[in-house]
Amino acid sequence: MQIYDLAIIGAGPAGCMAAIRASQLDKKIILLEKNNLIGRKLLLTGNGRCNFTNTANLEVFLEKFGMDGAFYRDAFNNFSNWDLINFFQSQGLDYKVEDSGRVFPVTEKSKSVVDIIKKVLKEFNVPIIYDYHLKNFNRKSEIFQLSSTKNKVINTHKVIMATGGSSYTVTGSTGDGFKFSESLGHQITELKPGGVPLIVQEEWVFQLKGVTLENVGMSIEYQGKNKHLPRGNLLLTHFGVSGPVILDMSHEIVEIMDNYGDLKLKIDFKPEMNHESLESNLMEDFQKYSKKSLKNYLNYHLPQSTILPLLATINLDYQKKLNQITKKERLDLIKILKGLPLTIIGHLPLDKALVTCGGVSKKQIDPRTMESEVVKGLYFAGEIISGCGRRGGYNLQQAFSTGYVAGESALK
Ligand SMILES: Cc1cc2nc3c(=O)[nH]c(=O)nc-3n(C[C@H](O)[C@H](O)[C@H](O)COP(=O)(O)OP(=O)(O)OC[C@H]3O[C@@H](n4cnc5c(N)ncnc54)[C@H](O)[C@@H]3O)c2cc1C
């Protein structure tokens, strides 16, 4: 009976990096992937441009993973953002840095990242079995026995589970690893979406799909509380809202909704002005341009397509001349310019989320090695681990770093 030293399940960024590191340690390894190619999700990342890491320092990296970000201190130290950048550079793929420290391949193509990984796996002679859809996973007298849907059996001393989360299931990440891990005694924390667009009640928003409200202020109102979100672009969609800030903050917003129900997203079109200065600004303008119609005047303040639907929310006639606007109407106008309320009634399903927040509990994983505390010889890497990072390249770095650590410690 052939027994491998290590089998790695899943050829996403985590599994591939684990295989690359493990292959340098001169042991018998195998990489198993249910698709007929590696990195299917990786190809989609960063809108096809692959924001593979960030130039931020370690403390910022940990912060981006929230409450238990400290779990990753060893992994990010062991294989840092600069180690990853150097790895790609040494293989001939240069990088570019964009706003907020986001790092992309200079080609701006995810495919170049996948191609480099494929090339390195080949150079390091990593055997890969494609179309290997793991179906059964057992442990018998210190040996793991794996079998596929086609009944191909693999025996191995160690296993790295790098099967990803359960979003964008079309890419192969269908949450299989959660089931296997649970059956071996691991706790799976609640699978919630991270990086997910939100659904709003106000139907007029749907007509404005594709419109971006640029650099607006945003806050969430629930149960008399107010949570400020970073300023940024808000994309209106055929079901609600999306865009960088929403995707970035969505797992916190989803958490609030789970606890408190529907909530209000308040949009501030004039975040650089407070109420008083906006009011005196409008009063001055209303005098200066008294013969102008409200609709024409608001072109200075709002994207054109939003003017009529917004005025409709306060029953204000867009044809009125500025000198016909009453004080109440002016105050209503200020109210929506400084805090247009949208009712958030839900979010798109987990499958449409960029990442799965939730997974194998970190409490059962040794952060220095990524080895399970429950089943010796079993390691975890990538998105299968509970929690998720913010957008900005942090999640891919997490996959590469934990993959590297798991690949190294499984064979050392
Ligand atoms: C549209 C989109 C854009 C994104 N953009 C970015 C970005 O720009 N930057 C960033 O940092 N993050 C981004 N992410 C998140 C990032 O892609 C993931 O965090 C990352 O891919 C996780 O890597 P992984 O190796 O853990 O899992 P995955 O990439 O999901 O890989 C898991 C692999 O395991 C295989 N597998 C699953 N079950 C089995 C089984 N039973 N048998 C055999 N194989 C199996 C799957 O087929 C898959 O190939 C994005 C995600 C999406 C969906």
Image (cartoon, rainbow, N blue to C red):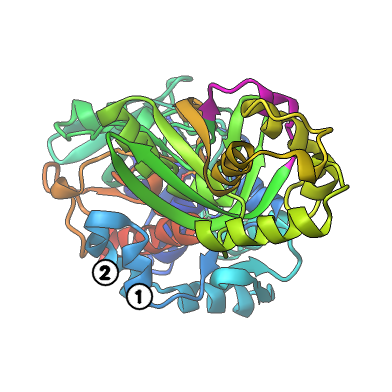
- Picture residue at 47% right of the left edge, 29% below the top: 344
Specify the amino acid type for callout 1: Leu
Give the alpha-carbon distance from disc 1 to disc 2, as whole Å: 8 Å
Circle 2 packing at 10 Å, graded few (<14), some (14-19), many (20+), is some
Q: Quadrant of residue 201?
A: top right
Q: In the rendered image, is residue 162 in sight?
A: no
- Label 1 residue SS: helix
Q: Residues within 10 Å of mark 1 (few under 14, many from 20)?
A: some
Q: Are marks 1 and 2 in contact (CB under 8 Å)?
A: yes
Would residue 300 appear left or right of 282 to someone viewing this image?
A: right
In the picture, the disc for residue 200 is: none
Vertical comparison of 345 with 333: above or below = above
The residue segment tinted magenta is 199-211
128 relative position to 229: left or right: right
Say if residue 382 shows up in the picture. Answer: yes
Position of residue 271 in the picture relative to residue 309 (left or right): left
Q: Is residue 231 above or below residue 318?
A: below
Seen in the picture, residue 364 relative to 103 is either above or below; the reply is above
Residue 307 placement (x, y as % from top left)? 75, 38
Viewer-proximal residue, 223 or 159? 223
Q: Secondary structure at mark 2?
A: helix
Q: Is residue 203 magenta?
A: yes
Q: Position of residue 170 (x, y in %)?
A: 58, 28
Q: To which residue does mark 1 refer? A: 58
Residue 83 x %, y %: 47, 77
Q: Which mark is residue 73?
A: 2
Looking at the picture, which amino acid does disc 2 mark?
Arg
